[in-house]
Amino acid sequence: MSTAHSLPITVGDDWLAMQSAGTLSPFKQLLLTCQADMAPHLRPLFASDDHVAGALLESAKPAALSDDFMSRLDARLIADEKAKAPTSGATHAASTPDWMPAPLADYMRRNGRRLRWRNAGVGVQQARLGRNRHGERLYLLRAKPGLPVPRHSHSGQEWTLVLSGGYKSGAQQYVAGDLHQEDESCTHDLRIDDDGPCISLIVDEGKLRFANPLLRLFQPVVGI
């Protein structure tokens, strides 16, 4: 049974500082933006880090701007506005599932992505949303209620934002709005809650490393 926390689980101060400094990858930035959309009371936390980043910028030594700086900035702003403009005849609200945060829906619209679920194992479906030049993958995962996920580790960082439902990893419960971080140093199993399917938005740097050799054999087929 999913149990809400007084405050959602989110990333640590180091990652928030990277977010404020603009050095976080776009996919990880998207997850934080989606979490803030789902949990508005987290926004002051992100804003406080922005104030710190602003103070650091104010204390930095000034640098000379290039001659074409303003023209390049104008071009970038115009391009961003065009990307945000709604597609003619689109019915954004009608086509967006209730569990999907607005920033994710905007990302999919701007990048021409559609929600296409494919089987990724017994009781699991995956919808691929993108891959960047650093090897990070962005995708949605939908798992049926009560599903046990076998013991595994990770190839690099994995960030999981729970959008709907929940699951338990060890003694820790994760519910909608929580952001779960793991990396190659952690080995764990988890179990999907019984009260409904779990839908998560995931950014990872590599596929899972299952402890069971048989699961590793079939991993290329399911793609996770």
Image (cartoon, helix red, strand yellow):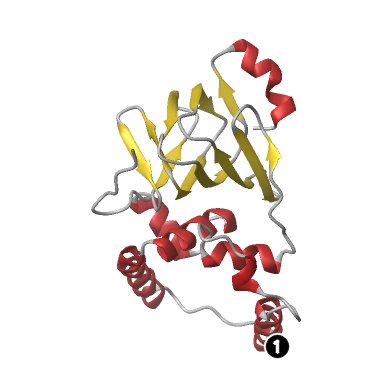
Q: Which three-letter amino acid code belongs to the residue tagged 1?
A: Ser
Residue at 60% x, 34% y: name it: 124
Mark 1 sits on what residue?
71
- Identify the image quadrant of residue 103: bottom right
Residue located 41% across and 42% down the image: 166
State the image coordinates of residue 19 (x, y, percent, origin top left): 45, 60
- Residue closest to the eye, 14 or 198: 198
Quadrant of residue 115 in the image? Answer: bottom right
Q: In this view, does 97 lie above or below 157?
A: below
- Is 68 rendered above or below residue 17? below
Residue 114 shown left or right of residue 201 in the figure: right
Residue at screen point 51% across, 25% down: 153
Disc 1: CA contacts within 10 A as few (<14), some (14-19) or many (>=20): few
Left of 14 or right of it: where is 214?
right
Q: Where is residue 168 in the image (x, y as percent from the top left)?
A: 37, 33
**Residue 44 in picture, x, y percent from top left:** 30, 69
Q: Where is residue 179 in the image (x, y as percent from the top left)?
A: 41, 48
Q: Element type at marker 1?
A: helix
| 167 up-or-down from 67: above or below | above
Quadrant hosting residue 27: bottom right
Residue 136 visible, this angle = yes
Does the image show residue 186?
no
